[in-house]
Amino acid sequence: MKLKGFSAALNWPLLVGRVLFVAFLTGLLAYALWPWLPGLRAARPRTIVVYGFSILGEVMNDGIFPAFQAQHFDRSGERIEFISSFAGSGTITNQIILGVPAQVAVLSLELDAQRLVEARVLPTSTWLDLPHSGVLNRTPFIILVRRGNPKGIRGFSDLANPGIGVVHADPLTSGGAIWALVAEYGSAARADPNSREAGSRMLLGIWRNVVAQAASARAARTQFENGFGDALITYEQEALRDRARGKLKGDIVYPQSTISSEHTVVVLDKNIERRERELVNEFVDFLWSDTAQGIFVQHGYRSVDEPLNVKNPSFGHIADPFRIQDLGGWKRVRREIFEEIWKKRILPEVGR
């Protein structure tokens, strides 16, 4: 009897090892077969991969994603998870071109969406088939100045005055920075429509005063808050967000004339499996629903559904708002303002 007990004691670790090994194989097999096993599929949430420009992170993570998850669960009883990444629009676009598995992207400007077509990541301008030609929401560009506005800044022209330090995001990586360029140029061009050089002079004067640059609009905001410069050109939404939370470090100046940025949604078909198409389409449709647009308005974005904007009384008045179409559209703006004027004339002139 002692020998049998001794033998059983010796075999016990072997028995446990076999049980664990069988359990491991069973789990591995279940993981491999989960798409075809209804019980396991219900337990494992499906995912949607979303990339977006820098300032969009908060409203998506705190508002849009939870609202869609709740709506989808009420309809189907199915849990959805989001995998997301937010950075400068140019950075996000470069990452998508390099192959990140984004299924939906919200870019700061249509110009970056056009780059995806040029890189053959998108076959054509597919976003034009979406509601509002792919424009998700808007926000005008404003000037954020130090508390009490000690330099007396009232518009973009004041940013070209001697002794003014300007914080600016980098147009080579930030969609917000390109919008800022267009706001600066356009405000001068509209004020003096008979002058071909008014916009160029405005850009030159402002960029001579740029004292700090950052890769994204959010990073430029951090530089300003850390004490760099006298003024920051940024999205209205960024300033309203902090003012609503009592954390605005400065005052908002609304230029008489400025541009409203329009943010473009693209759907990356090549990264969407056939069985996930319906889910991704449901999410994209949700972005233009009254629920989602109302969430954007609550977070300081201006809705493409104009009547919803009255729900946010903090939106400031702009005497002469304009849009990219008023300057000839993105192809013309890219060629004439961004490439020919800013890159080839302004940057060499200011030694950057």
Image (cartoon, rainbow, N blue to C red):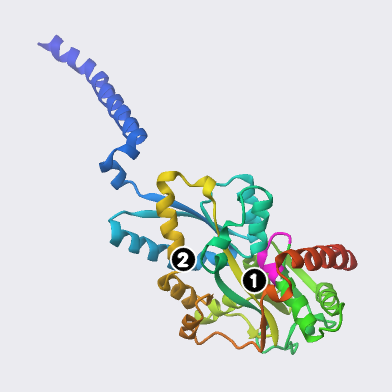
Q: Image quadrant for the C terminus?
A: bottom right
Asked whether 11 falls inside the magenta stretch, the response is no
Residue 187 visible in rendering? yes
Residue receiving disc 2: 287
Toward the right, the furthest residue is 349
Residue receiving disc 1: 221
Residue at x 64% of width, y 71% of height: 221
Q: Return the mark for residue 121.
A: none
Hey, what amino acid is under mark 2? Leu
Does 267 sit left or right of 21 as displayed?
right
Q: Horizontal and vertical percent for residue 218?
A: 62, 67
The quadrant where residue 186 appears? bottom right
Q: Horizontal and vertical percent for residue 294?
A: 44, 75
Classed neighbour count for the residue bearing mark 2: other residues with Cα under 10 Å, few (<14), some (14–19), many (≥20): many
Classed neighbour count for the residue bearing mark 1: other residues with Cα under 10 Å, few (<14), some (14–19), many (≥20): many
**In front: label 1 or label 2:** 2
Against 230, residue 285 (above or below) is above
Marks 1 and 2 close (CB-CB < 8 Å): no
